[in-house]
Image (cartoon, coloured by chain):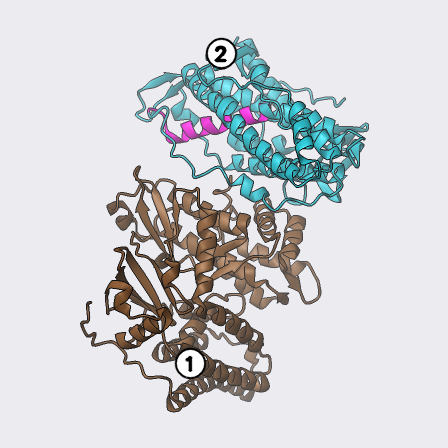
Amino acid sequence: MNAEANSSVLTFVPASLAERAYRSTQISWTGLRVWLHYQTLIWWDKLRRRDPDARDLHAVHQKNADLIFHTAVSLRGMLVKMCQVIGTRSDIFPREYVSVLSQCQDRLPPREFESIRRVVEEDLGKPIGSVFAEFETTPVAAASLAQVHRAQLITGEKVAVKVQYPDIEHIMQTDMTASRRIAALYARFSDNPIDFLPLLDELQTHLRMELDFRREVESADRVRDFFSRDQDVRVPRVFEEFSTRRIITMEFVTGAKPNDLDELHAAGIDTQGFMLRLMRIFNRMILAHGFFHADPHPGNIFVTADERGKPVFTLLDFGLSKQLPRGFGMGLFELMFSMMTFNESAMLRAFRELGFDTRKGDDDSLLYIARRMISRSDTGSFQGEFTEDMTDEMFDAVRESPIVTVPTDFVLVARAFSLLSGIGHAIGQRGNALDAMS
Amino acid sequence: MTQDVATDRQEFSFDELMADDPFEKSLVTNDIQCHGGYIDGEYVSPRGALRRPAIRNWCERLSVADHPLITIPEKYVPPNYPNYDQAKYLLQEGVVEPVTRALTIIAIVEGFGARIREVSVPNFDTEVEESVEGTALAHLASGLFEAHARDEAGHRDQGGHKQMWEAARDAGLDNPEIPDDVLLRLMSGGSPATRKRLYPELSERMESMLLMMTNVLIIETFAEDTFNWAKKLLGDPEVSADPEQAAHIVDCIARDEVPHVDYLTVALSELRARTLIGVDGKTTLSGADVIDGVFRRQLRGMATVRPQQSRERSQADIHQAVSDKRRASSVARQFEELDSGWTFPHRDDEELDVLLKSA
């Protein structure tokens, strides 16, 4: 066993009452500061008889987003996860928040090994050495909920072991309670509040599911099944006998990053039609199977070369996987298609089918959103690619117009397509969903 | 019958190629405004006021110069699967899903025909030795591709063939439930193969355009049997909910496809009668050699392996759908007995080479 000490490792201490009180105070203090940053401006504008709604809030949004980001990174745990979720909700939060908080990457200082060993031994019900011939004590990655260690099974297979931090459920409870208090206070004192409580409910449900690693294993199994006859997609094998609610033991995989052309070429990967292949994989999950890996950022996709040099995509981390409602794929296809042909009545039918709705049931707001989105396309028309610019513009329009319901599913799909488009742009290709279908 | 505008012009503007005839009534189906319209009670295709005479004039010019037109022999057109008798039998037995799936996929594929507007047209001035002035070739990027795209996918609030196929399906099959696996079937072709250059001497743009045009021409020609099948099936009062309307819509689509086959045939034949210049500006290739080569390659794939694979997939789907039925084995057996027994041409069949007819 590799048991070298890591100086940056955090020693695990079960969340004490004092620690929980500290976390609550820090979260509340951050919430108060964020609120005051806005409120002070409103008071000042009212005093000067100016319209507070006319003020450009870019700087204060940026300042507050940075403040929340730093609090989350210092407190870690659920707050990091919460920031990541906010980073996916362009339909609700201003661009500055989405841009800063989506950077709340899953790269944090690791926990000290003893606490990890304890989880492994508790969950597997045997000494770590009786399952693993080797278990590196320094993790290869540490995130908000878990860290990943490289290991070798007694039977010889090289594996990656994802181990959940102990006490994470208590931390979640503490952070949720504090966040709910802030949301309630915000609703009480704000003139025109965003209703955060349903969002927190959604987040709590999502986090509870994410904390059960068996669900992640099931998601990986489903996607593996979808592509069982496809040579260019891989989902690492999971060793179910060594996986539990808090542990996933899976085949160790490496590969080039999909957004690094030099790395891809160095790995001998033929990049002709690279994005077409990657988009086909996500099209099949989203449009055809209705269940998809909703977080295709470059860190979750490894690329290797097959015997002919064609790319093989290994998909990792199924924590954020999503089951889409029946008919969603066809609805989304119809929306893309009608946007491509500027057919506004078909666009409206597709918007409604996907679950979009407006406060007054009017059509103009929905068309306005589509027009704003298309206006940010390089070609002046929608060709099938959800670029980051286009999705940002779309969600700006959503926040500004009287939309009541934007389906979360659509937000996640648009984000996934936008992440894929970003990968494409990094290597000089287009991440075009319609191209990949035709 | 619509009287075409009398003109001997060879040059047409973009707007002229988009111009409609003076319709007395427009085509509205399934509450959707579609393209085209009626004159003296007869359906007239969209964007035809000058596109029709233009294509006719370009074709006549080829004829005067004694240049032949490329053509696909009828015997290579694979019949629709399942055939009319089989499809009718399935509908009578209450197995609607395979027909619904087939019609929905046709609608989507037709819609994707709009991508023809994205084809990059090469610079004919530098890549073709002879002038292309006053030809269909010279009008590909300035109206013909766009008109074709609009016909297939619709434009703004005017439905095209995609919406018309959906309307025919819904009229004939009484708004059937769309199978969940339609998009999966459409995307089940595996990863895109890396294409090897056929004529590396030519610009990639020229080769891609030729491949795309040939591909579309073959698909459009092969679709003729599908139109006859759909008209007969959806127009059969024994199995269709609205035989008159459903068959009429399919007939409208079939009429609209005529100018597509015509302009693609004329443009490829025009290029066939010319000399192509390579990217180095010096190498020249006979247009006939290149067009015939591209055509031969595409036709060999599209008339043999691909329809056979597609037929096998459909057959498996149909048997799957039948297996849920009572008397499953008897229905399956009866279905197979109605098969017309088409033999697919072999890839090496020399007769699959391009054939010509006089313009």
Q: Is residue B332 magenta?
A: no
- Callouts 1 and 2 on one subunit: no
Instruction: Say how many tags the image has.
Output: 2
Q: Write the residue at 43% across / 84% down.
A: A27
Question: What residue span does the magenta drawing correspond to?
Answer: B201-221
Circle 2 sits on which residue? B351
Label 1 chain ID: A
Quarter containing the N terminus of chain B? top right
Give residue A287's mark. Answer: none
Please name the amino acid that badge 1 sits on: Ile
Chain A drawing hue: brown
Classify B133 as above or below A284: above
Q: Position of residue A368 (x, y in %)?
A: 61, 58
Residue at 57% across / 50% down in the picture? A329
Q: Provide residue A37's location: percent of width, then percent of height.
A: 46, 83
Q: Residue at x 49, y 25 (%)?
A: B305
**Mark 2 Cα-neighbour bin, 10 Å: few <14, some 14–19, many ≥20:** few
Q: Secondary structure at mark 1?
A: helix
Q: Is residue A108 left or right of residue B255?
A: left
Q: Amino acid at mark 2?
A: Glu
Q: Nearer the viewer, mark 1 or mark 2?
A: 1
Which one is in front, B141 or A242?
Answer: A242
Principal secondary structure, stretch drawn in magenta: helix
Q: Which chain is cyan?
A: B
Q: Could one spot residue B223 in this view of the protein?
A: yes
For disc 1, the neighbor class at 10 Å (few under 14, some 14 to 19, many from 20) is many
